[in-house]
Image (cartoon, grey):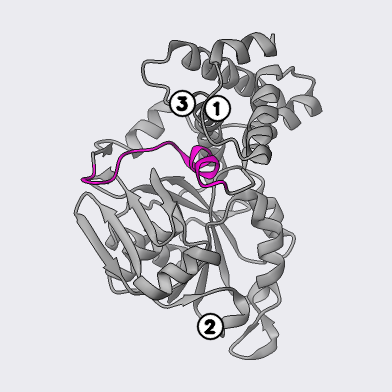
Amino acid sequence: MRYVIIGAGAVGGTIGGLLHEAGQEVLLVARGAHLAALREQGLHLTTPSGARVLHAPTAGGPQELELRTGDVLVLAVKSQDTAATLADWADRPVDGDPERTAARELLLVLAQNGVDNERTALRRFDRVAGMCVWLPATFLEPGRVSAAGAPVAGVLTLGTVPVGDPTDGDLATVSEDLTAAGFRAPVVPDVLAWKYAKLLSNLGNAVEALCGPLRGNDAARELLTAATGEAERVLTAAGIAWTGEDEQAAAREGYTLVDLPGQPRGGGSTWQSLQRGAGSVEVNWLNGEVVLLGRLHGVPTPVNAVLLRRVEQAAASGAGAGGHDAAELLAEAR
């Protein structure tokens, strides 16, 4: 099995780097300055076990490699890039045979936040697996990724989509390889229930990106509580189940974050996107998902609508993270 990591940033770089370090064949797909840094200097990966430089093969896109039988595509781009990225990869031939394409032959694993990527992937790919990613990682500089989780790097819950056989052979092998590389990677019957639970926690990404760290910020926590309450009412109205807190806590039992030398802990993925000046954010697939479902099912979502609008404005203006008052945002929503 070769793992083709499409989007070797914070999550993809950590997954691909640790798989490579564990002896798996890995190819890291990146672009721009990050790709150049990976090729010139290797991947600088820092975890609680130390800092090291890993030299895995790289590619700038599907045109730079030949796909092979047994390849696993791991999509780790942000949700706003899913449709265009999958369009580039779907029709690529496997083993040089144009009749055997990636979309028909290869397992696609979606290592992404949000709950719409699976629907997008199923429009093109026959074999789709979701991954609920619990992997706090940081990517702020080209070529450098850190992940502070211990005693495992992250909890990566897997499952076929639509709901299928949790004993699927290829997915079971992916689970085994990830476990050997230092993750928890259980295969579950209904991975989307886990991803909807993660969606609720990801609503805080927008709050953090706008208002800074939640710790010690009572107004920001109140804002997050209001956003999460809206989302829970929306999911209930839509008849969507999500994994309960007790089951989530059991899956992450003993998992904690540690301070990494020389690696100050920043914010989550949306905060990092604003700090890097990435120009786009995935808030429309997080808070925006709540707004969409609320409108479809007649549930008001003013808090999530404000967060969606304000984060997208910050991304468009290049203003960077922080600078907003949580109490003012909450008042705006009311």
Q: In this picture, which residue range is highlighted in magenta?
A: 260-277
Disc 1 crowd, CA 10 A, few/some/many (<14, 14-19, 20+): many
Dot 3: what SS? loop
Compare marks 2 and 3 and give the one earlier in the sequence. 2
Dot 2: what SS? loop
Residue under the point 50% across and 76% down: 71
In the depicted structure, whether residue 235 falls above or below residue 144: above
Mark 1, residue position: 210
Q: Amino acid at mark 1?
A: Leu
Q: Amino acid at mark 3?
A: Gly
Q: Percent x, y for residue 67?
A: 56, 82
Magenta span includes 188: no
Residue under the point 67% across and 79% down: 92
Q: Percent x, y for residue 87?
A: 72, 67
Q: Which mark is drawn over residue 228?
A: none
Side (left or right) of 305 relative to 31: right
Mark 3, residue position: 212
Q: Nearer the viewer, residue 90 or 310?
A: 310
Q: Percent x, y for residue 264?
A: 30, 40
Q: Is residue 25 visible?
A: no
